[in-house]
Image: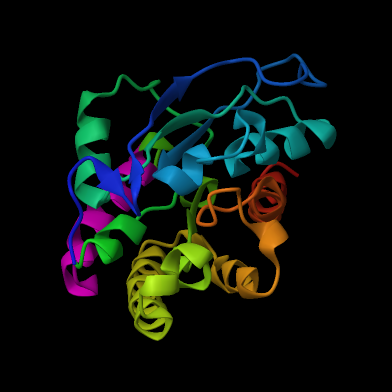
């Protein structure tokens, strides 16, 4: 099954290419704030939740609460993006010379459009190598997040949850293996997203995307890992 180029999981694209340096409250420290680049799709921009509740912004706020000075995250993501579309976005974006931290979460739209895990492998590896380059080739400053399982949401009622789970697992096997090959930290959040079957508070009002409560769990993992690299 494939999607119209203007739709993803039944929703229109919404563009969030964000390059901001203020968020919620000023950093506790003012000397040399760290930079964080988050690459992805709707799960990175936080479709359907307030901007400050997406996982990159929640992670930065947690890091600030630890006394670490961070700029607001720079987010390059768009609802509906596949690996190829994220690549096109990267090709057109103006980046800083280098970032202190970079995260990558991409692939759900490849799966939704009927692409195979094998077809996902090469473009994902290319993106992860670029993420590593954005971090100045410091492997410990990059994190990959696994792909959430949308088959556990009400939106998937007319789909086959078992098939979706199987395919998401295959995609995650690919991105985990590539992350391991490149020495990149891997954060598995897929299991949490499957709890939405019995806990609707983990979903946004569209019954598809995660809520701020769910993103907080991802952010805790991201912030926790980043902070260990600064201790």
As displayed, is residue 187 above or below residue 103? Answer: below
| Residue drawn at the location 28% of the way across and 23% of the way down | 93
Q: Is residue 161 left or right of residue 226?
A: left
Residue 160 painted magenta: no
Q: Percent from the top left, x then y, of residue 8?
A: 31, 49
Q: Decide if residue 102 is in sight here.
A: no
Report the magenta residues as a range: 115-133
Q: Decide if residue 173 is in sight here.
A: yes
As displayed, is residue 34 above or below residue 152? Answer: above
Residue 231 image-quadrant placement: top right
Residue 119 painted magenta: yes
Q: Count the marks.
A: 0
Q: Percent from the top left, x then y, of residue 44?
A: 49, 43
| Residue drawn at the location 67% of the way across and 26% of the way down | 70
Residue 177 image-quadrant placement: bottom left
| Residue drawn at the location 67% of the way across and 20% of the way down | 23
């Amino acid at each position: 099954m494939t999607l119209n180029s203007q739709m993803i999981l039944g929703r229109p694209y919404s563009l969030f290419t964000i390059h901001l340096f203020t968020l919620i409250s000023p950093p506790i420290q003012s000397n040399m704030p760290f930079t964080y680049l988050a690459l992805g799709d709707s799960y990175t921009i936080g479709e359907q939740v307030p901007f400050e509740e997406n996982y990159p912004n929640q992670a930065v706020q947690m890091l600030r609460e630890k006394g670490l000075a961070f700029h607001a995250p720079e987010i390059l993501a768009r609802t509906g993006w596949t690996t190829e579309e994220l690549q096109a976005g990267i090709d057109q974006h103006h980046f800083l010379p280098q970032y202190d931290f970079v995260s990558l979460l991409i692939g759900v739209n490849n799966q939704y459009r009927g692409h195979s895990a094998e077809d996902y492998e090469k473009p994902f590896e290319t993106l992860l190598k670029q993420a590593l380059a954005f971090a100045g080739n410091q492997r410990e400053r990059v994190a990959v997040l696994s792909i959430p399982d949308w088959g556990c949401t009400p939106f998937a009622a007319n789909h086959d949850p078992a098939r979706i789970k199987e395919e998401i697992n295959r995609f995650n096997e690919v991105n985990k293996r590539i992350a391991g090959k490149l020495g990149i930290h891997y954060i598995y959040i897929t299991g949490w997203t499957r709890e939405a079957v019995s806990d609707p508070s983990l979903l946004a009002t569209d019954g598809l995307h995660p809520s701020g409560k769910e993103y907080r769990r991802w952010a805790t993992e991201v912030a926790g890992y980043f902070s260990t690299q600064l201790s």
